[in-house]
């Protein structure tokens, strides 16, 4: 029964076995969002603020914050974004960068216990990121690729995850504070991508006893009706034990699939959330209010 | 790689590991359909005919035929329904009755290799149904309950399934011709119902090497937005290896979940069906035509 506890200044969220799936909002990320990138670079964070509020209103229990903009001062931008987001919403955040100075700047201003996104299995990265995670008492996303890149062999990806969990333990970071991303490939490019993730998620849960996450939308890259593929993928991954994903909470069909999967895995106790959500479909605000209260309970 | 081959006079369908999921249309069943029951009893099969055509047009690769009407001559009605349905559609049928004489009458008029639905683990039922299945060269649905009823313990349900498969072998019926129904309880009444089925389906596939089916809609009984629960359940069950279900093919969200699950388990080769379906959503007839051709390939 592994629980990963994350917090903001005022709220805790638990990602865990036998708990409802945790949606980590992916929208605050300038990669591929030209307008957002330009605004952030120019010091305009109004869209960041609006995206934070919209994602939490849509049901995200956490938000991922990325400020990776070419030729910009990423550490300063990431810290600024985090401070601003923490001033408008109270969900815990995932601090997302491949630059160690940016992670450090983000952690420095963060109130609570963040999720550091991410560390890979490369020795140099491990030895730079893990001490920072340990020192700040954060949890960390472990991405199962290493110096050789992303292996198409799920056994290799499992071994990389195992190495990261063991290395984290050497730094005093418990397995409960390591959330493994087994890496989701586009199913349109690799027909075995889904089955690989399902079996990896099972092994990670049963053998390493770690929580899991992924960048979910990648699975449907290039296909029509992407949200149906992404939502069905997440439901199936939940059936194999996946406990969180970095994703957009703004698509109703994806959210419905996740909520149905919570019902079907028994984590939505007595189908309470499902029934409340559907009692009065027009009372969206009311439903959000109730969900929001429920999420405060760890 | 277990394949169960069913046929009509002109078409074969294979239910199998690593094949697209097979939808067995459930609509031709007077249980709970008062009007249909009255019409069938009065010898009016126009609705049976229309339901057969509609389900096949909606994508059902097989149809279940049930004529269980109180105080009616079920063997005669079932035989009549089967003859009529085989005259208007060419998909293989599941002959559905708890009355041995009705199964016998249905098999007598059936053209091709039918699915006999069903046999339970009760000794008396086994010894009456299995010789009939063996004699007619049919396949059979094995429902995992016995004299003690439906156990809430999945291990007991597995053992009943194992007993039926073994007893079938004694009668010369191979495991490939036994499709096990692990029994799906309403998730609203039993929060573990989903996890039980998922783990049973895995065991049935890995240990007994049998195909599986279920009455899918039962899982969402009593809940709002039933189709979303049923569709998500089927996708998750497919993720654990379920290969067919007796269900309504008329609800788009259920079908979409199944088709997405086929993509995600790699049985929709190169996502071909998914992409064709979405190429021109308005060309439903054309899409159906193409799907229909594809299904002719076993």
Image (cartoon, coloured by chain):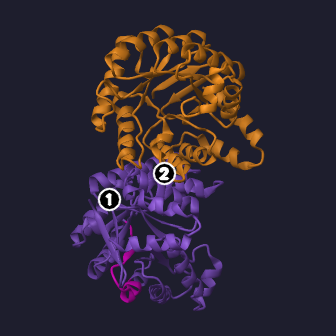
Chain colours: A orange, B purple
| Tag 1 residue | B17
With A216 as the anchor, is A155 left or right in this view?
A: left
Query: Are the residues at dot 2 and dot 1 in contact (C-beta closer than 8 Å)?
Result: no
Quadrant for residue B105, please give it. Answer: bottom left
Considering the numbered disc 2 on the image, is that residue within a helix, a strand or a loop? loop
Q: Which residue shows up at 67% across the image and 37% down it?
A: A58
Residue A84 in percent (x, y) is at 68, 18
Q: Which residue shows up at 50% across the image and 30% down it?
A: A16
Q: Nearer the viewer, residue B27 or B103?
A: B27
Camera sees residue B117 = no
Q: CA distance from mark 2 to mark 1?
A: 24 Å
How crowded is the residue under tag 1: few (<14 C-alpha within 10 Å), some, or many (20+)?
many
Q: Nearer the viewer, residue B279 or A26?
A: B279
- Bounds of the magenta segment: B104-120
Q: Nearer the viewer, residue B108 or A205?
A: A205
In the image, residue A289 above or below residue B228 = above
Task: Find the residue positioned furthest to the bottom.
Answer: B43
Where the C terminus of chain B falls, by quadrant?
A: bottom left
Q: Nearer the viewer, residue A135 or B165?
A: A135
Task: Find the residue positioned furthest to the front.
Answer: A71
How crowded is the residue under tag 2: few (<14 C-alpha within 10 Å), some, or many (20+)?
some
In the image, residue A51 above or below residue B2 = above
- Give the numbered dot on residue A223: 2
């Amino acid at each position: 029964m592994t629980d990963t506890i994350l917090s903001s200044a005022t709220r805790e969220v638990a990602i865990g076995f036998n708990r409802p799936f945790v949606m980590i909002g992916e929208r605050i990320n300038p990669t591929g969002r030209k307008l957002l990138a330009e605004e952030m670079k120019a010091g305009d964070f109004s869209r960041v603020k609006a995206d934070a509020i919209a994602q939490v209103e849509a049901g995200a229990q956490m938000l991922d914050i990325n400020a990776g903009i070419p030729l910009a001062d990423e550490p300063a931008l990431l810290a600024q974004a985090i401070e601003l987001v923490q001033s408008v919403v109270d969900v815990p955040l995932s601090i997302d960068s491949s630059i160690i100075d940016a992670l450090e700047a983000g952690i420095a201003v963060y109130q609570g216990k963040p999720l550091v996104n991410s560390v890979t299995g490369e020795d140099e990265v491990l030895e730079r990121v893990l001490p920072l995670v340990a020192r700040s008492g954060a949890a960390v996303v472990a991405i199962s690729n290493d110096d050789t890149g992303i292996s198409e062999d799920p056994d290799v990806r499992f071994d990389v995850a195992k190495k990261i969990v063991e290395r984290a333990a050497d730094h005093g970071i418990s397995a409960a504070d390591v959330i493994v991303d087994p890496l989701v490939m586009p199913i349109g490019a690799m027909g075995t991508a889904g089955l690989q993730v399902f079996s990896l998620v099972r092994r990670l849960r049963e053998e390493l006893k770690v929580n899991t996450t992924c960048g979910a939308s990648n699975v449907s890259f290039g296909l029509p009706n992407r949200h149906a593929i992404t939502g069905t993928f997440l439901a199936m991954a939940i059936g194999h034990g996946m406990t969180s994903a970095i994703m957009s909470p703004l698509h109703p069909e994806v959210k419905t699939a996740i909520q149905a999967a919570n019902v079907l895995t028994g984590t939505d106790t007595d189908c309470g959330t499902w029934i409340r959500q559907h009692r009065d479909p027009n009372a969206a605000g009311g439903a959000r209010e109730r969900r929001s209260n429920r999420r405060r309970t760890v």
